[in-house]
Amino acid sequence: MDPPAAVAAVAVAVAGSGRKYVVLRRSTLGTNASYGEFADLKVMPHHQRTAKTLSRVILAALLVFVTSPTLPADTTLPIFDTHIHYNRDDWAPFSPQAVITLLQRAGVTRALVSSTPDDGTLMLYRHDTQRIIPVLRPYRTPADRVDWFRSADVLAYMQKRLARNIYRGIGELHLTDASHTDTAQIARLVEDAVNHELVLHVHSDAEPIRKLFTIRPQVKILWAHAGMSAGPSLVGELLDSHPRLWTEVSLRTGDIAPNGRLDAEWRALFLRHPERFMVGTDTWATFIWPEYVDIVEEHRDWLRQLPKDVALKIAHDNAARLFIR
Ligand SMILES: [Zn+2]
């Protein structure tokens, strides 16, 4: 048995123990690992071999984890889209059933939806209570976006809606300045989020995110668009500092995979924090809907360039763990 074959055999043995990320084909083993240690397996007495093999099973499991294969090009990854709006302007051109059909065609098995007004979310939810995960948006009309964070009316409206008990989060909400987190309404909102286990879906720069965690470190935040303009080092710094921060990368495909090729720094960050990233499309305007299936496919293109286990987490599993009860 030549050394790579030995590794493959050990890997198959580990696969038999039920680990789902194990490589089964020799051809998928990485080229950056050293197989030299495995060369002496065949000349040892059986009992020594057993002990050595055991320690090598562990080593091989680690090795295989590091060199987990990518997905074949024709794989349709299940997608949990964490950034959908079904706003008032969308309702006439795209019926709730038309939207659900688009999600099905795109292979989107779950979707986090928030809308201006919230009734759009409720319409989609009624059509497909399995696929649609409702998130309560503070904005009754687009005008609320300007000063919702200091409006007692908006807070009262939200608390009334939250009593429906169907929501898994609050957002997508905008905080364009860190000082906007200093209001009594935001303090109450963060308190409600913690008490009702709701995730805040926040569109902001890094500073408002840091300030929200100073109000209540227990709050869970999904950072929209990974800060929209934040680079991988800043996103990584925030994820390192805040264990209850997740981020979704809607509208960031141009940064993450310019010309379709996964950027090396983003790739390194995905591998460093594989549990904390999610994907999303952001249907912020009606003209996005006809492009929806293609936008989802663009996400799959760069996800396929990641190790399979990481791709599955970012495409679907991280969001499922956070939002499905
Ligand atoms: Zn949005």
Image (tube, rainbow, N blue to C red):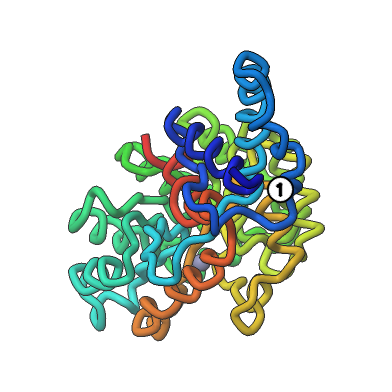
Query: Which amino acid, mark 1?
Result: Arg
Between 307 and 135, the one lying in front of the other is 307
Residue under the point 31% across and 41% down: 166
- The residue that label 1 is drawn on is 272
Q: Is residue 106 above or below residue 220?
A: below
Residue under the point 35% across and 58% down: 118
Please provide percent x and percent y for residue 240.
Answer: 76, 42
Please provide percent x and percent y for residue 220.
Answer: 58, 39
Q: Is residue 111 above or below residue 16?
A: below
Q: Tell me the quarter of the picture where residue 230 sits.
A: bottom right
Between 160 and 60, the one lying in front of the other is 60
The N terminus is located in which quarter? top right
Q: Is residue 236 above or below residue 217?
A: below
Please provide percent x and percent y for residue 87.
Answer: 37, 70
Q: Quick check: 229 left or right of 54?
A: right
Number of numbered discs overlaid on the protein picture: 1
Between 13 and 89, the one lying in front of the other is 13
The C terminus is located in which quarter? top left
Please provide percent x and percent y for residue 27.
Answer: 54, 59
